[in-house]
Amino acid sequence: MSIDTDTARRVAKLARIQVPEADLPELANEFSAILGFIEQLNEVDIEGIEPMTSVTPQRLKRRTDVVTDGNQPQAVLKNAPDAREGFFAVPKVVE
Amino acid sequence: MSDLSKMKISEARDALKKGDVTSVELTQACLSEIEKADALGAFVHKTPDLALDMAKAADANKNGGDLNGIPLGIKDLFCTKGVPSQAASGILEGFKPEYESTVTSQLFADGAVMLGKLNMDEFAMGSSNETSVYGNAVNPWKRGNSDAALTPGGSSGGSASAVAADLCLGATGTDTGGSIRQPAAFVGITGIKPTYGRVSRWGIVAFASSLDQAGPMTKDVRDAAIMLKAMSGHDPKDSTSADLAVPDFEAALTGDIRGKVIGIPKEYRMDGMPEEIAKLWEDGTAMLKDAGAEIRDITLPHTKYALPAYYVIAPAEASSNLARYDGVRFGHRAKIDAGDGITEMYEKTRAEGFGNEVKRRVMIGTYVLSAGFYDAYYNRARKVRALIKRDFENVFDDGVDAILTPATPSSAFELGSMADADPIKMYLNDVFTVTTNLAGLPGIAVPAGVDKDGLPLGLQLIGRPWEEADLLNTAYALEQSAQFVAKPNRWW
């Protein structure tokens, strides 16, 4: 499939990565090349095959639903670019 | 003694136990080598003070494990408490974890000493260590009389370079599509990716969670067995880690492989395979046969589709895993302009923090998971993945114990030589290794020869799930026959 610049722009937006308008045509070309490579998969007969969800047949373990951790807000916030009064600070979210 | 850093883990362990050497001496020898080796770009965060403290503690500890006092390098992908852990990305600039990954916790509990953090491709996305924010790691080997800098492979390029250049006794790596085995082959060392679930992924920066596994990169098979044992085991913090007993892998190394059935898959004989690689593969086959194994031609019909399936599944998982890098909780945050809201903050942060290959893969992943394309790409790839796994199950059901293939389609190439190439050309480096990640199987790269320019070449053995002990023993037999002893000439 050939990807156009509109699609490249939309994917960049969905991925929340700012891409300058001038870079979109090259990005679209790269996507087209990679998707072209991926499209070999269309040759495979997948009739009746279940998509793999887990490579090991084991059932995921469950643990008891109890609190095992907590009470360390300082450690949690230690690496934040902007932490204030015990919270992560971000630009205004609501309009 | 100036050659202490050249010791194997097994030799150092025995010397430490006998009292012939101390961990402090070993550690100082490695730190001194590291100081002289900046040209290799292997160690990107050095922790000499921490290392010496750990070494002193190891010397005082009479109850340490096999790795007590052994100086190791740790790939930057592992979170290490209080020590920068950036996954070689600008977006994790300044990040110092408040916790320790399970693997490094286990290594340290055994008594291992951390020398520092090792270079890698950004978020483990790459096959040449050229996507790192720290700059390239460089292969200690040179091609013939050429002075050109070669890649140590990727993504665990720093680990490969450090072990091959004797800057440490062993190193941790991680492998999502070949990132332990390809670099190990490029620098002439041993690297094993265990069965998916053998080693806890907790505290390792995630790339593609259904494919990622950590493993050791070492100077020989015995060292890989020793280190793998310390890294393995069930971890309640990783729900995919297997609740299975960890065998004594080293005890399995008898070198006796009589009666074992070794499969040679015809689909791995690629068009245009360099003659030297084909020859190496034949030589390895003959070595295993001489050691008493039965050689059997096998077919893995969906091999051709492994790389395209991987380049749907891995980017899809990466796009989801890397969504957490948004400039809110850790790492880099872009400066925003007046009027910018949170979306602009996300978009600018990720544009500044991620390198080009990471951006490309996150966007490909976003595309294949997006409405309207999910079935055509992502679900189809997961079905093909099921078929690839079934190929292996069929040959194992027929009695095959292990599969022998080349580890890489070439020897190490020049840094920068792929800069203008189509990204797919770089992806082809993983053509022999990626199948085991998709099928969750253990795979090991063993150095087995050199090419016409004197560069190391590796062979890969693929084993049955959970049978790393048997796989390591077959690798040990191959190692005994191949007698690979070449070392790079020091230029750094």
Image (cartoon, rainbow, N blue to C red):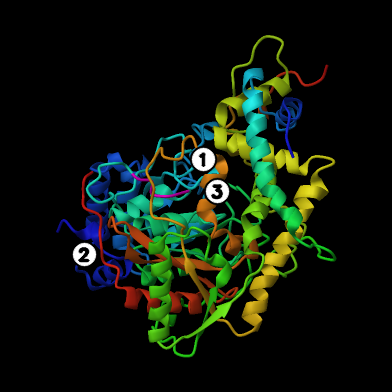
As measured in the structure, the alpha-carbon distance from the residue carrying label 2 to the one carrying label 3 is: 44 Å
Tag 2 and tag 3, C-beta contact below 8 Å: no
* Residue at position x 70%, y 29% in the image: A12
Helix, strand or loop under label 3: helix
Look at discs 1 and 3 and give the one toward the viewer.
Answer: 3
- Nearer to the camera, B343 or A50: A50
Whole-number angstrom distance, CA of label 2 to CA of label 1: 37 Å
Q: Amino acid at mark 3?
A: Tyr
Q: Amino acid at mark 2?
A: Val
Tag 2 and tag 3 share a subunit: yes
Would you say residue B385 sits in the magenta stretch?
Answer: no
Q: Which residue is mark 1?
A: B122
Q: Position of residue B190 (x, y in %)?
A: 39, 64
A6 or A89, which is in the foreground?
Answer: A6
Q: Indicate which label's residue lies in the foreground, 2 or 3.
A: 3
Q: Earlier in the sequence, mark 2 or mark 1?
A: 2
